[in-house]
Image (cartoon, rainbow, N blue to C red):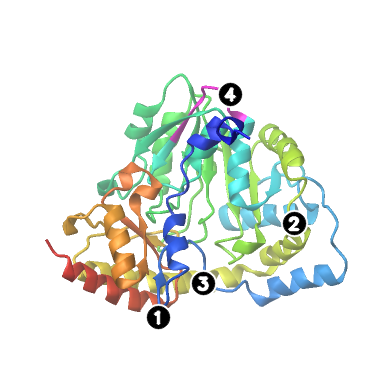
Amino acid sequence: MNYDSLLSSKAKQIPPSGIRKFFDIISEMEDAISLGVGEPDFVTPWHIREEGIYSLEKGYTYYTSNAGLLALRQEIAKYLDRHYALTYNPKDQILVTVGGSEAIDLCFRALLNPGDEVIIPEPSFVCYKPCTELADGVPVVVETKAENQFRLTADELRAAITPKTKILVLPYPNNPTGAIMEQSDLEAIAEVLRGTDITVLSDEIYAVLTYGQPHVSIANIPGMYERTVLVNGFSKSHAMTGWRMGFVTGPAEVIGLMTKLHQYAIMSAPTTSQYAAIEALRSGDSDIVRMREEYNLRRRVIVDGFRKMGLSCFEPLGAFYIFPCIRSTGMDSATFSEQLLYSEKVAVVPGTAFGQSGEGFIRCSYAASMDNITEALSRIARFVENNKR
């Protein structure tokens, strides 16, 4: 077999995730600490796990409707109204997906025609560019800047728009930088979009994890609701990463087409996970508050730690990542990350894994335990001291 000609040329051209390399190495290291995993270190709260177990005991092992259990979609609608004052019809504006990642992929495939352009602020989550290309779209990268706390500005957006622009990805709160968009920022973006046919893909998977001010969705801004596809899920908010539960909301016409694609590719999200998710939404708000308070404590410790060792970083106001600048060491992001891993057994992710504008930065997650954060900071400080220019 000639596998070189057999395999899809489009798929072969997509590079592997820049995050995985370090995870594979650290899995074989003893006494290693990972600040690279974007995963809560909390176990899914017991009452949520119990509901999943109970669904199995009751024999709820069947397919659900393609869009997901109606009871779950109703709870999602209540959750969005309760937290963000957003109103969606559970019957035709909400789709339950296999994690937020499936929702992102479905959105691109439902909206893009060959050659359509997708504006992607970077640094950002690794899947937007590959998913755009797999849907025959053209990624248009906007490099956000540290001096703007990695927020997308109206001027940057305006300069990137062309007649071929179809989608704006709005990935806030942001992975990897911890940046947020405040209401005034979103209003400026909305002013640029009014009068266009550009759809916003608003990835709000970290929406409940903001510090100092509540999250505002661009769907709340006048004139934006009807052009916004909102992606969210349970992985970060309820520590349910392995349950693979996400959801997407938006105009009924868009959600209807996404549901059709989901029907052929997935059929329905895992039934056990859906029952657990119902319980998470009905009774999990206190869990969110508890975990957010703990993340906030860790956030303050890790920001202070990096600043004390002389690595500048702006204060992250969302998600559970910090994005310190390592240019003062004279190393690029990949070299710093590799040498830190081998010499001090601490895994971080080079900023370039999230786009070329991430050069000179590293991503560290403070979803690790406080003990691991404290020890990792000590090791990183020693590494920085030993490698001063």
Image quadrant in which you'd find residue 140: top left
Instruction: Specify which label sits upstream in the sequence, 1 or 2.
Output: 2
State the SS at label 1: helix
Q: In this view, does 256 lie above or below 125?
A: above
Identify residue for label 3: 41
Report the Cα–Cα distance between label 4 and label 3.
Answer: 40 Å
Q: What stretch is highlighted in magenta?
A: 111-119
Image quadrant in which you'd find residue 368: bottom left
Q: In which quarter of the image is the N terminus?
A: top right
User: Does 260 sit left or right of 130 as displayed?
Assistant: right
Identify residue for label 4: 113
Report the Cα–Cα distance between label 4 and label 1.
Answer: 49 Å
State the SS at label 4: loop
At 70% from the left edge and 65% from the top edge, which residue is drawn? 282
Identify residue for label 2: 270
- Amino acid found under the numbered disc labelled 2: Pro
At 70% from the left edge and 45% from the top edge, which residue is drawn? 94
State the SS at label 2: loop
Instruction: Specify which label sits upstream in the sequence, 4 or 3.
Output: 3
Q: In this view, does 191 lie above or below 66?
A: above
User: Does 172 sit left or right of 101 as displayed?
Assistant: left
Q: How crowded is mark 4: few (under 14 residues within 10 Å), some or many (20 or more)?
A: some
- Amino acid found under the numbered disc labelled 3: Asp
Q: How crowded is mark 3: few (under 14 residues within 10 Å), some or many (20 or more)?
A: few
Q: How crowded is mark 1: few (under 14 residues within 10 Å), some or many (20 or more)?
A: few
Identify residue for label 1: 371
Q: In which quarter of the image is the C terminus?
A: bottom left
In contact (CB < 8 Å): disc 4 and disc 2: no
In the foreground, 58 or 29: 29
Report the Cα–Cα distance between label 1 and label 2.
Answer: 35 Å
Q: Where is residue 76 in the image (x, y as percent from the top left)?
A: 68, 54
